[in-house]
Image (cartoon, coloured by chain):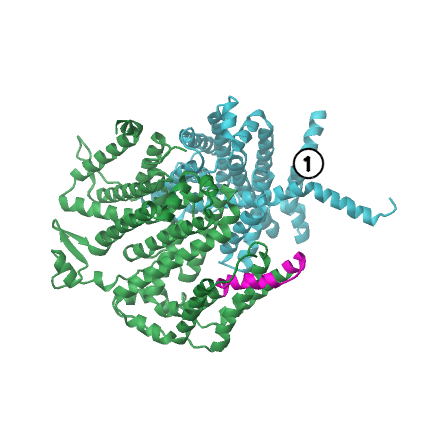
Chain colours: A cyan, B green
Amino acid sequence: MKNISGFLTKNRGILIFFAVMLLLPFLVGLIEGSSPALIWSNQGSISKFVEGLGIEIFVLALFALSFDLLFGITGLLSFGHAMFFAVAAYLTGIALKTLSMPFGGVVLLVLLAAIVQALLFSLVLPRVKGITFTLVSLGLASVFHIIVMSSDMINLTGADVGLQGVPVPAFISPVTERLRFYAIALTLLVATYLFYRRFVASPTGRVCVAIRENEDRAKMLGYNTTIFKVVAMIISSLTASAAGMLHALYQPIISPSVADLGYTVTGLLIVLIGGVGTLSGAIVGAFVLRLLDFTLRRFIGESASFITGAIYVIFVLFVPYGVVGTMRLRQLSTKSGWQRLAGLLNPKK
Amino acid sequence: MKTNLRKNSKAIIVLTVIAVFLFVAARGMSGKDVLITVLRGFSIGSVTFLVAAGFSLIFGLLDVLNLAQGTLYMIGAYVGWTVYVRPDTFVDLLTPILLILAGFAFSALWGRLAGLVKLAPKPRKTIAWLLILVGFGLLAVVLTRYPIAKWDLDVYTESPITYSYMADQGMRIIPAEVAFDRISPFLALAGLLLTSAISAFGIALLNRDENRSKSITWRKLLVPGILLLVGILAAVFNSRITSWMFNMSTNLLFVIAILIAVLSGVGLGALMETTLIRPLYNRPIYQLMLTLGLGTIGLQIVQAVWGRPEFVFPKPEFFIGTGGACPATNIRDLFANHCSTILLLGGRVRVYDEIFIPIVGIIVLILVWILLKRSRIGMIIRAGVQDRQMVEALGINVRRVFTLVFALGVGLAAFGGALAASSSGLTPTMGERLLLSALIALAIGGLTSFPGAALGSLLVGLIQQFMIKYGQIGIPLPFTDAVFKPSPPLVPASTVLLMVVVLLILPHGLLGTKE
């Protein structure tokens, strides 16, 4: 009993988030004027739209979480992270469309591919460090991007148009069963976040943080740092693959742009907005970025991506700890500020 | 000698293996194919080298991996194109840019004036920010009303594609002049100078404590004075300069275009280093992310200004002669007829793409090498690559050298862009592609090694070209009749593979040294 209550208080924030997000479609439905029963049977149009936006945010957040584990926690800056995402997305698409595999088999295949990729990246891990690792990962990922874009495999990947017409299994079809899809994506995100927090608090996770801070010292203490990096890489790759799979199932087209450097930069941007190494920053950042992008695109149009770039530069220069990181730093002063304000309002006390 | 060999045994073995591979690859082709492929490899290698050299200089001294280098390469190409195809736009732009620069360059004067202001820090800072905001706001107003000849991306006949196509055909469209109708000329010039002066004074007020001791000398006022004078002259003689540039020989115009491209690269580099990179010197990973973001922003700007479609950069007169004695068979014919191609070993070699670019690449290599090895600044750079703290401790102003090296590196990239644009055309994706090649070349050669950058670029260029050539003729597989044709995606993939293999054997690259 004590364990459960401890778990609840420790993860209060994310559990409240989970509950609110689960109820959100129904709340939107109430505002829209459609009853919860209608929402339950996927009828309300605005709430369906909100669910769609939510799914996109959850996929981005999942991807950014995996990037944060690698970059923010373990200190490995990989510019090829989008490859994990893209391989899973394309594999899901091809397995469902061309090979018409059963859905369980597809999931297994994607997870297997994720582990294989992580091991491929790990092959170079013991030899190259720092910037050189960044370059090698960029190189590997761009080879994948080039292969996807090439016209030789147009039947499989659709080249630069993208992979279209993936037959999604009926029970999670984003058209007819969007609420279920939304709930699954949300649950996956929350579960992954909880697992990540547990991982970072575990002895293995602590060593990963030590590697980020000072790898030589961690080595001197007798840890085989390569193994820990590989573990972090595998977990991160699995998460990114799950995100990629959701992306492939939700989006009507799998565009090859998910495989290029720009998509990794999106992940980096989200982590940066939220706060590097904070984990919850990835979720906050995904919300901020997607909603900002959505509004800007609606009111400004094409130059929205320019503004996104400018925001990125501003964050790098002036808000290096991101939203969550800065809030954590300011927490004490904010608390005392509130207390002072309360004291002013209540002078008798 | 012996210890040297033993120390570098791995690098020598790897190099030998690559050389043997290339030799075997060359044996499978006819003589003229080998020649053309090798020349093309040198050409691609030279362009890659121009970008990679800047990379390696910047990374070696400043520890900044400038990922915006690809975009700056592209900006160099587009700026060169603008000067070459639309000199009127360039002349129109010259005045505002020079006047704004002059306004900021009178910094010694502003610093002295700011020293006279007696105010408490807080109101002083408020006033300074206010001045900066007002200055930039008014500047924006003046700039939007300043007449600048533009192309129109939406109208096909006025798009960059049409202009460059017509110039390529030798029929230049001379666009109509834009008149001062939304602002009077005097107000425009005075406004540009004054608004930039107000913002510069605001900045000087903000940093008053840092540059209090500076005195005004005539030399400090000379440079901004010249900028001011040239800017005003350009405004007064605008139409004359424009028609002179439209009518001059395209060879000269080409040289001017490349010079302006390099200058704009140097200016952008200096601006980037002093304003954006400098505050982040103690946060290296953030520098990396910043340059990445700047690269994306630059790409967006280029797409917004010049549009997404691909267009050509016409070659100058010297390289487009046809008919008569062309293709030339010897050097004298080549110079007499300005042939576009020359016959070597029975194969047609394009003069600009396959002879001129490699020669320029080699000249730049030698010049930068002399700069590094024989000049005082080069000595400081080499010492800085070895041990930065020690150089600082010896009392050398490393900051200024940093700015210089950054500007030089970016200038080299812009030079490469303007040079390569004539042979490969202009697309918004050209920067990204070259960035990847340059990074691979650098990783192969060794990140901080200048000769390594040259060697890596050459290897990347050669391997790419051999793969492309074998993609056309096919590799006969042993013991079968089947022919294996490497498809285009395998070209970049092969260089990445080489990089991974080299890095697995030598984590510091071929010529890199251990830290």
Q: Which residue type does callout 1 highlight?
A: Arg
- The magenta-colored residue range is B103-125
Residue at the spot of label 1: A12
The reply to whether the magenta stretch includes residue A69 is: no
- Specify the principal SS of the magenta part: helix
In the figure, is residue A297 to the left or right of B497? right
Q: Which chain carries label 1?
A: A
Residue A219 shows up from this direction = yes
Q: In which quadrant will I find the N terminus of chain B?
A: top left
* Residue B232 vertical position relative to residue B262 in the rendered view, above or below: below
Quick one: B284 or B70, which is closer to the camera?
B284
Give the quarter of the image for residue A157.
Answer: top left
**Residue B14: percent from left, percent from top:** 28, 32
Q: Is mark 1 on a helix, strand or loop?
A: helix
Residue shown at 22% from the left, 52% from the top? B354
Residue shown at 28% from the left, 28% from the top? B9
**Residue A149: percent from left, percent from top:** 36, 45
**Residue B131: percent from left, percent from top:** 59, 64
Give the quarter of the image for residue A112.
Answer: top left
Residue shown at 12% from the left, 49% from the top? B345
**Residue closest to the far right:** A348
Quick one: B170 or B479, which is closer to the camera?
B170
The reply to whether the magenta stretch includes residue B108 is: yes
Residue shown at 31% from the left, 40% from the top? B495
Residue B182 shows up from this direction = no
Q: Residues within 10 Å of mark 1 (few under 14, many from 20)?
A: few
**Residue B262: percent from left, percent from top:** 36, 57
Q: In which quadrant will I find the C terminus of chain B?
A: top left
Quick one: A144 or A76, which is closer to the camera?
A76
